[in-house]
């Protein structure tokens, strides 16, 4: 096997040459008219907001910061401008069932006009109806009815009185009512004289009194009916007067809204209710000690004719686009408020408040998915509306059946809305898996890319994007060196020298901070130095933990060797993610072997500190060991592998190459160079596979070596598949160019073993045997000896013969 050469400095990063950019500053570039790198997502967004079919709502998925909301907002506002304005909606009183307010639909802008018209009508009613009831003609009519009633009653009583007098009986009025008494010569007969009458006379008088008493009782019983009839006649007179007064008020309104059948029907109901409740408009002198009761009664009567405008599109241009930042159940679907009065809670149809889904009806509703699912029952309420295609306002307690008190039941409003959910991919896949309604209601997914291909054309478009952001936020102009450095940083964020990041928040923040450092220097043009300063300051603000870890390694608290050789010990590499900052950390991986039953023990897994992927890597490692070195006999060893000084969870398989090399070193008793570190995943055939965080891992080991002093022997082994992902820092590239540090691409574990030990790994011959003097031969021989020792340890012990007692 030929010695493996390290990568040249030119392959460690993509360097953007400013001289290749066809401009001097961002002032020379036009604004970008398109969105970069999101062709698939843009097509999905266009399709999702354009198709008007049931269930074709839109879920926009992707990580935060890629511009999902900005792009969706741009498309929605453009589409909504050309869409027709939706209808206005009002709630009005239902005079037949007051607890079920009616919903009225109006053409856009006419809802507010109707509210104003009804307010004017109420004011007119407040004046016109009492005025109509106070006219001399009406008063005369009422007085005539009252006079006729009194005369009729008096005539009836007078006739009874006259009949009684002809029979010698006198009708007497008392404070308790009427009484009958015998009389002589027009005077009531005194008790003494009555007692002197004969028995026959008294019986005759008593009979007359009883008959007259029956007539009197019948006459008195008719009084309530006569009074009721009088009241009905007066009420009818009042209603006739009110109807006459209403004609010139209601007819113009009904003609104005004659094209809206529901509105005309409601106006007729209002007219009938006003006529039926004319007495409510009369001034009352009742309850002089509590005048607020009379005022409240009058106010309540007029409140019935108010209009609750819940959706008004008069000021709108096109369809509404509503962003609900706090999508609770009530904020989405509306609520019914209550007000306190004399110690009790009251509600009214004017206290119905709309939700964001009402305001978005006929347009688009945008909601952050995670915020929606954090609100109790908000998702269930939204699904119910989308399925039913109408919005029903009710309290959450009523919806869940927790209370049964009397409340309002507003008439549901028909729903035609396009819902756009913004969320991450994991939530989208979980919903698809566990909520069968989700696939029916959100049939369009717009998946946003995190990276885009890098080419000369895409770099120029990216430069236009930078120029657009600079002008939009009124920053200082950026020269082409600054733009080139931002392009390089974009590739670094993408962790791929052949890609550029589409994480616009990162690029926007870098532009802002570079502009700040330029202003601090008093310059008018942002240069590469300001961009570098912004990047360095971003790292410096976040790298406290990294500095402490590296300090502990340099001081020897965390044991990491960067020179010398050790048996069964390899420098592995891991990545720590802390918020928006990640860094590489070297870790000492050790392996021990002994006679056993062929198991490889993952100590991290045994103490439940190893994740499933790491455990899988160790199992693959054991399989590779058995397949390569023990095909003709079972493995007879027990091996242990561990991350030393690791006190937290360990996951991932990127250390499996290092663990395998540590095992081979322990088996062959050949030391490993500590000046090298290894990262990479291995499969059952010994091939090295790509891993993540390759840049951070290389830089993490480089930083330790640099602080201790670069010797020219130090370096990192990485999978060859990760070479296109390299975007290393410039100080690392400079060290490689000077030959003080090295990066080796490996494709097979044999290459890693040879580099780490300085001894050829060895390839098998046609018989499967390894050449003597190679690492693989030493491993094979050690395993063969272990097998022989295990066989010997399993032989039965010789029998002990007793010669004294045959």
Image (cartoon, rainbow, N blue to C red):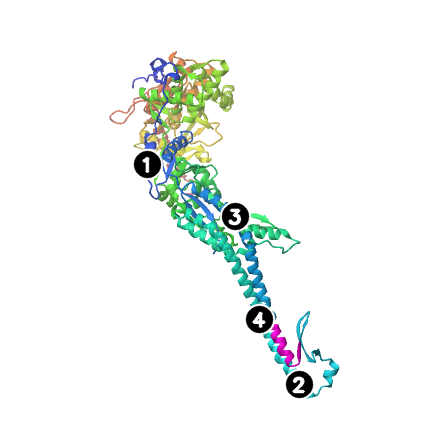
In the rendered image, residue 493, in percent from the top left (x then y), is placed at 40, 24
Residue 169 lies in the magenta-colored region? yes
The mark that comes first in sequence, 4 or 1, is 1
Residue tagged 1: 47
The span from disc 4 to disc 3 (Cα, nearest Å) is: 40 Å
Residue situated in front as seen by the camera: 452 or 524:
524
User: Considering the numbered disc 4 on the image, is that residue within a helix, a strand or a loop?
Assistant: helix
Residue projecting furthest to the right: 192
The span from disc 1 to disc 3 (Cα, nearest Å) is: 52 Å
The mark that comes first in sequence, 4 or 3, is 3
Q: Which mark is residue 633?
A: none
Quadrant of the snapshot with the N terminus: top left
Residue tagged 4: 222
Residue tagged 3: 124
Horizontal side of residue 184 vs 756, given as left or right: right
Q: Which numbered disc, 2 or 1, marks the residue closer to the eye?
A: 2
User: Considering the numbered disc 2 on the image, is that residue within a helix, a strand or a loop?
Assistant: helix
The mark that comes first in sequence, 4 or 2, is 2
What segment carries the magenta color? 156-170
User: Considering the numbered disc 3 on the image, is that residue within a helix, a strand or a loop?
Assistant: helix
Residue situated in front as seen by the camera: 602 or 251:
251
The span from disc 4 to disc 2 (Cα, nearest Å) is: 29 Å
In the rendered image, residue 729, in percent from the top left (x then y), is placed at 41, 18
In the rendered image, residue 198, in percent from the top left (x then y), is placed at 70, 88
The mark that comes first in sequence, 1 or 3, is 1
Residue tagged 2: 203
């Amino acid at each position: 096997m030929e010695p493996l050469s390290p990568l040249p400095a030119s392959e460690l990063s993509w360097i953007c040459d400013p001289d290749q950019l066809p401009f001097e500053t961002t002032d020379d570039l036009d604004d970008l008219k398109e969105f970069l790198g999101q062709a698939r997502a843009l097509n999905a967004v266009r399709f999702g907001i354009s198709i008007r079919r049931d269930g074709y709502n839109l879920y926009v998925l992707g990580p935060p910061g890629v511009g999902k909301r900005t792009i969706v907002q741009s498309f929605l506002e453009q589409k909504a401008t050309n869409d027709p304005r939706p209808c206005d909606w009002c709630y009005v009183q239902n005079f037949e069932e007051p607890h079920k307010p009616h919903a009225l639909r109006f053409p856009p802008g006419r809802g507010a006009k109707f509210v104003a018209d009804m307010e004017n009508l109420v004011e007119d009613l407040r004046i016109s109806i009492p005025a109509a009831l106070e006219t001399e003609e009406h008063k005369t009519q009422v007085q005539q009815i009252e006079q006729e009633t009194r005369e009729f009653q008096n005539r009836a009583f007078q006739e009874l009185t006259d009949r009684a007098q002809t029979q010698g009986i006198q009708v007497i009025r008392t404070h308790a009512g009427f009484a009958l008494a015998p009389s002589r010569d027009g005077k009531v007969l005194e008790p003494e004289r009555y007692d002197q009458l004969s028995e026959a006379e008294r019986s005759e008088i008593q009979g007359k009194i009883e008959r007259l008493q029956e007539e009197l009782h019948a006459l008195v019983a008719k009084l309530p009916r006569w009074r009721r009839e009088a009241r009905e006649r007066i009420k009818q007179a009042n209603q006739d007067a009110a109807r006459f007064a209403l004609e010139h008020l209601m007819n113009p309104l009904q003609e104005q809204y004659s094209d809206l059948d529901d509105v005309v029907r409601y106006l007729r109901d209002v007219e009938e209710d006003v006529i039926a409740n004319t007495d409510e408009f009369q001034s009352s002198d009742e309850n002089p000690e509590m005048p607020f009761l009379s005022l409240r009664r009058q106010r309540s009567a007029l409140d019935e004719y108010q209009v609750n405008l819940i959706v008004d599109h008069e000021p709108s241009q096109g369809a509404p686009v509503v962003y609900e930042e706090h999508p609770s159940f009530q904020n989405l679907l509306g609520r019914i408020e209550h007000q306190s009065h004399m110690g009790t809670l009251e509600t009214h149809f004017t206290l119905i408040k709309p939700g964001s889904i009402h305001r978005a009806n006929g347009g688009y509703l945008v909601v952050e998915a995670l915020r929606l699912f954090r609100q109790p029952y908000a998702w269930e309420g939204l699904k119910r509306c989308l399925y039913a295609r109408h919005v029903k306002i009710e309290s959450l307690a009523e919806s869940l059946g927790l209370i049964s008190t009397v409340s309002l039941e507003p008439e549901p409003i028909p729903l035609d809305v396009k819902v756009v959910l913004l969320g991450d991919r994991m939530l989208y896949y979980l919903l698809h898996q566990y909520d069968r309604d989700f696939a029916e209601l959100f049939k369009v997914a717009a998946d946003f890319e995190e990276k885009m291909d890098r080419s000369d054309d895409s770099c120029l478009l990216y430069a236009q994007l930078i120029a657009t952001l600079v002008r939009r936020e009124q920053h200082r102009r950026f020269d082409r060196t600054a733009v080139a450095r931002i392009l390089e940083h974009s590739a670094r964020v993408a962790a791929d020298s052949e890609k550029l990041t589409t994480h616009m928040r990162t690029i926007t923040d870098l532009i802002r901070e570079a502009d700040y450092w330029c202003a601090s220097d008093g310059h008018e043009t942002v240069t590469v130095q300001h961009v570098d300063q912004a990047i360095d300051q971003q790292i410096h603000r976040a790298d406290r933990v990294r500095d402490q870890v590296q300090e502990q390694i340099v001081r020897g608290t965390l044991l990491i060797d960067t020179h010398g050789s050790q048996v069964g010990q390899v420098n592995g590499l891991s990545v720590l993610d802390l918020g928006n900052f990640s860094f590489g950390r070297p870790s000492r991986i050790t392996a021990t072997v002994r006679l056993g039953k062929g198991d490889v023990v993952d100590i991290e897994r045994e103490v439940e500190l190893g994740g499933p992927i790491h455990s899988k890597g160790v199992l693959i490692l054991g399989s590779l060991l058995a397949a390569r070195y023990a095909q003709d006999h079972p493995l007879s060893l027990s091996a242990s592998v561990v991350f030393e000084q690791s006190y937290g969870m360990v996951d991932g398989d990127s250390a499996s190459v290092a663990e395998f090399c540590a095992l081979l070193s322990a088996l062959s008793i050949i030391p490993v160079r500590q000046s090298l570190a290894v990262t990479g995943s291995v499969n059952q055939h010994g091939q090295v596979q790509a891993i993540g965080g390759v840049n951070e891992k290389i830089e993490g080991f480089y930083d330790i070596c640099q602080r201790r002093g670069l010797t020219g022997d130090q370096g990192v082994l990485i999978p060859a598949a990760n070479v296109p992902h390299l975007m290393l820092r410039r100080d690392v590239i400079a060290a490689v160019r000077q030959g003080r540090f090295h990066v080796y691409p490996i494709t097979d574990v044999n290459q890693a073993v040879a580099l780490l030990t300085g001894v050829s790994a060895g390839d098998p011959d046609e018989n499967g045997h390894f050449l003597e003097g190679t690492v693989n031969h030493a491993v094979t021989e050690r395993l063969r000896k272990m097998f022989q020792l295990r066989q010997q340890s399993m032989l039965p012990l010789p029998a002990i013969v007793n010669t004294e007692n045959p």
